[in-house]
Image (tube, rainbow, N blue to C red):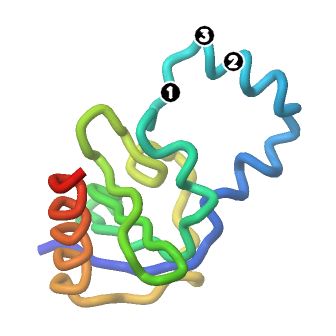
Amino acid sequence: MNTYLSTSLDAGRWRRESGTPQVLRSVLEAVMPLRNPDFEARYDDVCTWLLELENETGVVLREVGLDAQSQPIVVAPFGRNEGYWTNSTEPLAWHAMVRVDRTVFEAAWQRFQSSSARR
């Protein structure tokens, strides 16, 4: 059994606070492959994250990013997208997270898959 959490930690923060000028970031992104090529532009719009963690290790297995209308706009891992949390080595800030039921996570994951199939 896995653990499911929700957080409103700001995923877009790393882009705004990285200290790397936008021009340099654009050049680097042009020559280096993006870890989330389909979702990079959407991270600033994520308001809430739903995370699935492996109980034994605490490793994030899957993630769903929800927008201001609680619609899933990013998921990972998904296709060629490694993810924001699933690819992070940063420790999770547990104090800023709330447990959610597995069904909440799975419903959001399925909504994203259904909406991406229609595109």
Amino acid type, mark 1:
Leu
The N terminus sits in image quarter: bottom left
The residues bearing labels 3 and 1 have C-alpha atoms spaced at a distance of: 9 Å
How many C-alpha atoms fall within 10 Å of the one at disc 3: few (<14), some, or many (≥20)? few
Mark carried by residue 28: 2
Please tell me whether mark 2 sits on a helix, a strand or a loop: helix
Q: What residue is at 35 percent from the left and 38 percent from the top?
A: 81
Eyeballing the image, is 96 above or below 60?
below
Q: Which x, y percent locates residue 95?
A: 58, 83
Q: Which x, y percent locates residue 90?
A: 57, 51
Q: What residue is at 54 percent from the left and 58 percent from the top?
A: 91
Residue bearing mark 1: 34
Give whichever of 2, 85 is nearer the camera. Answer: 85
**Residue 2, quarter of the rendered image:** bottom left
How many C-alpha atoms fall within 10 Å of the one at disc 1: few (<14), some, or many (≥20)? some
6 sits to left or right of 2: right
Residue bearing mark 3: 31
Image mark count: 3
Give whichever of 54, 67 is nearer the camera. Answer: 67
Eyeballing the image, is 42 above or below 53?
above
Q: Would you say the residues marked 2 and 3 are in contact, meaning their CB atoms lie under 8 Å apart?
A: yes
The residues bearing labels 2 and 3 have C-alpha atoms spaced at a distance of: 5 Å
4 sits to left or right of 83: left
Eyeballing the image, is 31 above or below 49?
above
Q: Would you say the residues marked 2 and 1 are in contact, meaning their CB atoms lie under 8 Å apart?
A: no
